[in-house]
Image (cartoon, rainbow, N blue to C red):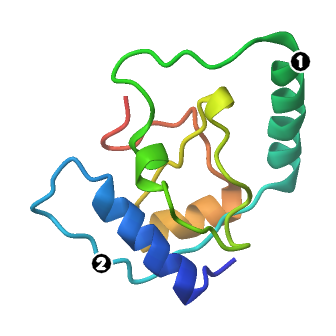
Amino acid sequence: VPVEQEDRKLLESLMNRTSKEPEVEFRLNRAIRVENPALWQRYQDFVSQLKRTRGTCQYEGRGPPMTQAALQGVELSDGFPQPLDENLCEAYLWHATKPHIAAKILREGFKVSERSAFGK
């Protein structure tokens, strides 16, 4: 699903505010939201169970995700599925790729188990 211009500007701003390389500025030309309703429902079911069985989130490592701080005071549009839940340690992650790989992801789905040139 193509991302509306207002949301692209917000994504561009979030990418720049959370970049580890402040001297590099991103310019987001195009964004496509890839939706998988079955996977989203599995996540929502998992979240419901998790909220019932455990307490609050305890961040490890470097602390809360940078996207949480970058989103402070930002009003999200309907283009974002929901606000991030700090008690679940949720964060937005950015995935950039070449157009032909994006087309493959759209056709075959995003396969977390597959490695990329930079994947670990």
Q: Position of residue 51 (x, y in %)?
A: 83, 23
Q: Position of residue 101 (x, y in %)?
A: 48, 63
- Between marks 1 and 2, how big is the CA–CA gap? 41 Å
At 48% from the left edge and 45% from the top edge, which residue is drawn? 68
Q: What residue sits right under mark 1 in the picture?
A: 52
At 60% from the left edge and 79% from the top edge, which residue is drawn? 3
Q: Quadrant of residue 36?
A: bottom right
The answer to whether marks 1 and 2 mark residues whose Cβ atoms lie closer than 8 Å is no
Closer-to-camera residue (60/113): 60
Q: Quadrant of the C terminus?
A: top left
On screen, residue 54 versus residue 104, left or right, reads right
- In the displayed structure, 83 sits above or below 97; it is above
- Do we see residue 74 in this rendering? yes
> Given the current orientation, which residue lies at the most extreme bottom position?
5
- In the displayed structure, 45 sits above or below 2; it is above
> Given the current orientation, which residue lies at the most extreme left position?
23
Amino acid residing under circle 2:
Arg
- In the displayed structure, 46 sits above or below 109; it is above
Q: Quadrant of the N terminus?
A: bottom right
Amino acid residing under circle 1:
Arg
Q: Position of residue 102 (x, y in %)?
A: 52, 66
For disc 2, the neighbor class at 10 Å (few under 14, some 14 to 19, many from 20) is few
For disc 1, the neighbor class at 10 Å (few under 14, some 14 to 19, many from 20) is few
Q: Which mark is residue 82?
A: none
Q: What residue sits right under mark 2 in the picture?
A: 27
- The tag earlier along the polypeptide, 1 or 2, is 2
Helix, strand or loop for disc 1 = helix
At 74% from the left edge and 13% from the top edge, which residue is drawn? 55
